[in-house]
Structures are given as structure tokens and as C-alpha cells.
Image: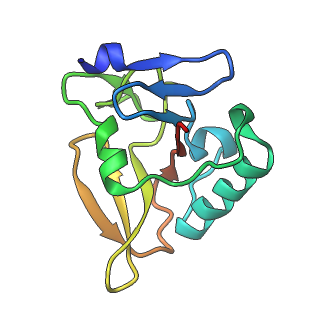
């Protein structure tokens, strides 16, 4: 199954990844909030989306590195907030963040982020807000 076939928009407002049996929110935190967030801000955004039952669900979470990297596909082109090409499916809302926070921390307490320009992973200080957002996911039960 290629990336074009695996993502589906749903009437509930979530995106289904049929390959990995996951839901994703179509917008990232930057698109929803209109501001960049540090890692703790990404966690607070997650809590808010759980409380408002986004897409009818209350179990949203930040992705792991592996899950975030599953969104990256070099053959796909989507526009980020600066109109640069990033490599995620066009079913996601355009003009999104280039980098997203994940739930993973390293031994020094830095948080992993995934870059959709090149599919790289970097660990950054959790207080960094430099063009950072998160994109929430949940497992389909």
C-alpha cells in the first residue's frame, strides 16, 4: 500500500492511517493555536484536545519518533507555513509546521522532534519554541 492510498479523511474530522491503524488530527498545534509551542506547551495542547474530545475521542497523545517518521514520505509534497515543500500527505491541512515534537526524551532530558523537510530526528531543549509544534495521534482500538 502506498502513502497515497493509506490516509483517509473521515467525517469525524480525523485522518485514518490504514497501514498503521492510527488516527491523526488534520491540523498541528501551530495551526490550531496560531503560535509555536515548547515541549511543555505541546503537552498542554494534548491535554486540551483530550478534554474537548477532538474527533470524538479523548485519548490523543503526542507521537513517538517512530510514529511521526511514518508520516514522512519523500515522494509526497505538502506546503509548510513558509510555502516550502515538506513530505507528508496532502490530506493533512496545508501550511503546517515543518518540525513536530514527539513524546520521547533522551537521557539528558531533551525532547525528540521530527523534521518533515528531510525526515531527520533531532533532540532539542524542551524550552525551545523555534518554529515548533506537535501533531496528535491515537491508536484505533
Q: Residue furthest front?
A: 141
Q: Residue furthest bottom?
A: 108
Quadrant in the picture for the C terminus: top right
Q: Residue at x 29, y 21 (%)?
A: 3
Q: Is residue 103 above or below residue 6?
A: below
User: Residue 97's x, y, as percent?
Assistant: 46, 42
Return the x and y of residue 79 as percentages of the image width and height. 39, 26
Q: Is residue 49 above or below residue 107?
A: above
Task: Confirm whether residue 43 shows in the render.
Answer: yes
Residue under the image location 21 percent in, 42 percent down: 118
Which residue ends up furthest to the right in the rendered image?
A: 52
The x and y percentages for residue 136 are 54, 45
In front: 28, or 17? Answer: 17
Q: Is 141 placed left or right of 81 in the picture?
A: right
Q: Quadrant of residue 70?
A: top left
Q: In screen coordinates, is 8 left or right of 41?
A: left
Q: Is residue 115 visible?
A: no
Check the picture and name the quadrant holding the N terminus. Answer: top left
Please identify the quarter of the rendering in which residue 36 is found: bottom right
State the residue at coordinates (51%, 51%).
133
Q: Position of residue 28 (x, y in %)?
A: 55, 41
Viewer-closest of 138 and 100: 138
Amino acid at each position: 500500500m502506498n502513502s497515497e492510498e493509506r490516509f483517509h479523511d473521515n467525517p469525524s474530522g480525523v485522518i485514518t492511517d490504514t497501514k498503521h491503524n492510527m488516527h491523526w488530527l488534520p491540523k498541528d498545534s501551530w495551526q490550531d493555536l496560531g503560535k509555536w509551542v515548547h515541549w511543555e506547551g505541546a503537552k498542554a495542547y494534548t491535554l486540551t484536545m483530550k478534554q474537548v474530545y477532538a474527533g470524538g475521542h479523548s485519548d490523543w497523545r503526542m507521537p513517538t519518533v517512530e510514529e511521526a517518521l511514518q508520516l514522512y514520505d519523500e515522494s509526497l509534497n505538502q506546503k509548510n507555513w513558509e510555502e516550502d515543500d515538506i513530505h507528508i500527505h496532502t490530506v493533512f491541512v496545508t501550511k503546517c509546521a515543518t518540525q513536530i515534537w514527539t513524546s520521547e526524551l533522551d537521557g539528558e532530558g531533551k525532547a525528540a522532534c521530527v523534521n518533515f523537510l528531510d525526515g531527520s530526528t533531532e533532540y532539542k531543549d524542551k524550552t525551545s519554541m523555534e518554529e515548533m509544534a506537535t501533531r496528535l495521534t491515537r491508536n484505533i482500538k
